[in-house]
Amino acid sequence: MAVSVNGTTGVNIGTSGATLTFPDSSTQNTAATGFGFKNRIINGAMVIDQRNAGASVTLASGGTYTIDRWQGYEDTDGVMTAQQNSSAPTGFINSLKLTTTTADSSLASTQFALVQQKIEGLNIADLGWGTASAATVALSFWVRSSLTGTFGGSLRNSAQDRSYPFTFTISVADTWEQKTVTIAGDTSGTWLTTNGIGIHVAFGLGVGSTYSGTAGAWAAAQYFSATGATSVIGTLNATFYITGVQLEKGSTATSFDYRPYGAELALCQRYYQLITAHLAQTTSYPYSCGTIKRAAPAVTSSAGNLSLAGITPSVDTFWARDTVAAGVYSIYISAEL
Amino acid sequence: MYKLISVISGAGLVQRLSDKAFIPFAEDNTDYQAYLAWLAEGNTPLPVDEQGVQQ
């Protein structure tokens, strides 16, 4: 059935605050951009933690995977830990908590701490970034910090020669607040649409001047955050919690794309998977990687005595035995970005 | 530090000794990319064992 108003097919709501009411009395006042799988971020609700099962990890300068798909970097004179946490706003059960355990209150220009997710290029191909028809995206997330002020982050391409620093304000300490950032797509630069890195989505936790840029504009530079943003690593025992992270196509942030747990886990397992398997000692047997991996994975085991029989793993299979003793082992399969 | 496990053309393996992870010679594997960067810094992996491919 079509609705015609003044000879035009369709219904137009152009008034601020207008609400569309359906026959079942449900309402909608924002445009839907999709009814599922609209979120390009994986594990945005911070519920999957295959590696650490809720344990705390200390971030390293070369990057440390915390909960699934989220990677923290700490390349300062301070120390920062990351851990899945049960503090969360209504509608969520987990968050990622970053804590400064040794402060660095005077960052050198090239020092930084951040947490980020690398979105695979295949999952952002429709955005058309790097072309004249680059689509606008909306980034939304919930944050809580012991600090208040202006915080920052950025979106970057794979080569890290295109960056969009952004800011958001935390007004009240230790209180969950939802933030939204609208970003016009980048019409320049190279944005991979392959199984490589499509977009880095980063939240700065203290970033030196070299990697900080002007908020709200694309730049041909490697910026992790916005100039003048609050440094979490700069204050001992400072905390920064984040959850409900969503990056979606369109200029309006919509409700969080809360996917079934099994679906979210499978999405994570394209990049990293923990399996438990019995390994023989003298004979290698083939094992499934589980979910098909993004790329041929690196493989190791809990005992560290794994042998792959000299056979390179594929995206779906590897051969293995334990060189010391047959038994049941945890096997870690990684094809992270 | 790394150790070569297999150097079969197009299907090699190297082991990262810090966590004993086996890393495939796959261009789109980021652990392999890190290995290549390590080589580019002038480092050399330990050789394949004398008996050839580690079984």
Image (cartoon, coloured by chain):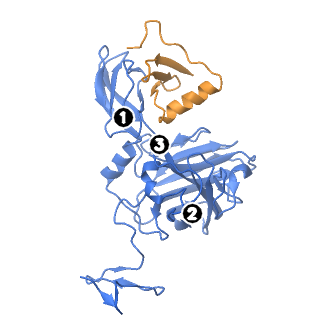
Chain colours: A blue, B orange
The mark found on residue A315 in the picture is 1
**Which image quadrant for residue A124?**
bottom left
Q: Nearer the viewer, residue B24 or A53?
A: B24
Q: Nearer the viewer, residue A295 or A171?
A: A295
Q: Measured from the top left, where is residue A289 in percent x and y?
A: 33, 34
In the image, taking residue B54 as reference, residue A155 lies left or right, namely: right
Local crowd size for mark 3, using a 10 Å CA cut-off: few (<14), some (14–19), many (≥20): few
Label 2 marks a residue whose chain is A
**Considering the numbered disc 1 on the image, is that residue within a helix, a strand or a loop?**
loop
| Real-space Cα separation, disc 3 to disc 1, in angstroms | 28 Å
What amino acid type should be assigned to the residue bearing mark 2? Asp
What amino acid type should be assigned to the residue bearing mark 3? Ala
Could you confirm whether marks 3 and 2 are on the same chain? Answer: yes
Looking at marks 3 and 2 on the same chain, the residue that comes earlier in the sequence is marked by 3
Residue ID at (40%, 52%): A47
- Quarter of the image with the N terminus of chain A is bottom left
Residue ID at (62%, 62%): A166
